[in-house]
Amino acid sequence: MLKIKIICLGKLKESYWREAEAEYLKRLGPFAKIEIIELPEISFQPKDNPEKIKEKEGKSILKHIKDDEFVIALDERGKEKSSEELAHFLEETGQRGQTITFIIGGPLGLSGELLSHANLQLSFSRLTFTHQMIRVILLEQIYRTGNIMMGKIYHY
């Protein structure tokens, strides 16, 4: 069983995102133990320095990462993988007994320090998604991964 931690900035504000998350967490029961850590976003104004905001958020995130975790930062400039590649990768990493920790940043993205701390920078697309949307997409991909690992037909 995969041990997965998702550290994210901000809450799922709309009920439809919360309902989608709840549905995937229910479906993921046989495949993975999921822990979600929601951290507050730092509010900012257009005049504020975005790098300083990302730095503060990054330090907050780093407090929740243990040294033995495999850290995957979701970033638009990261490596893209197919669902099958992601399934194989997560299965291999999970077999080592490591907790796989996914990081989802806020509207400004992730700090350079946090990105350099990650074992892998992963992109789901060259498109930009809201951090609420990507959280549900991540859960769907983990669910898809579990099905692929179990040899079930979930990928057409």
Image: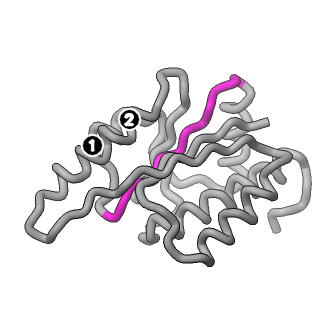
Q: Quadrant of the C terminus?
A: bottom right
Q: Quadrant of the N terminus?
A: top right
Precedes in sequence: disc 1 or disc 2:
2
Q: Could you tell me residue 153's position as x and y percent?
A: 90, 61
Q: Which residues are drawn in magenta? A: 96-107
Residue drawn at 25 percent across, 50 percent down: 54
Of 22 and 81, nearer the camera is 22
Could you say whether the residue bearing mark 1 is in a helix, strand or loop?
helix
Q: Is residue 97 magenta?
A: yes
Residue drawn at 47 percent across, 47 percent down: 103
Could you say whether the residue bearing mark 2 is in a helix, strand or loop?
helix
Q: Could you tell me residue 24's position as x and y percent?
A: 73, 61
Please identify, in this view, whether the residue under mark 1 or under mark 2 is nearer the observer.
2
Q: For the residue carrying disc 1, how many other residues have a C-alpha within 10 Å: few (<14), some (14-19), or many (20+)? A: few
The kind of residue on which mark 1 rests is Gly
Q: Is residue 149 magenta?
A: no
The kind of residue on which mark 2 rests is Leu
| Vertical relation: 6 (above or below) 12 | above
Q: In the figure, is residue 93 to the left or right of 45?
A: right
Residue drawn at 24 percent across, 45 percent down: 56
Q: Mark 1 = which residue?
A: 112
Q: In the figure, is residue 65 to the left or right of 84?
A: left
Q: Mark 2 = which residue?
A: 62
What residue occupies the far left of the structure in this picture?
47
Q: In the figure, is residue 138 to the left or right of 51?
A: right
| Vertical relation: 27 (above or below) 55 | below
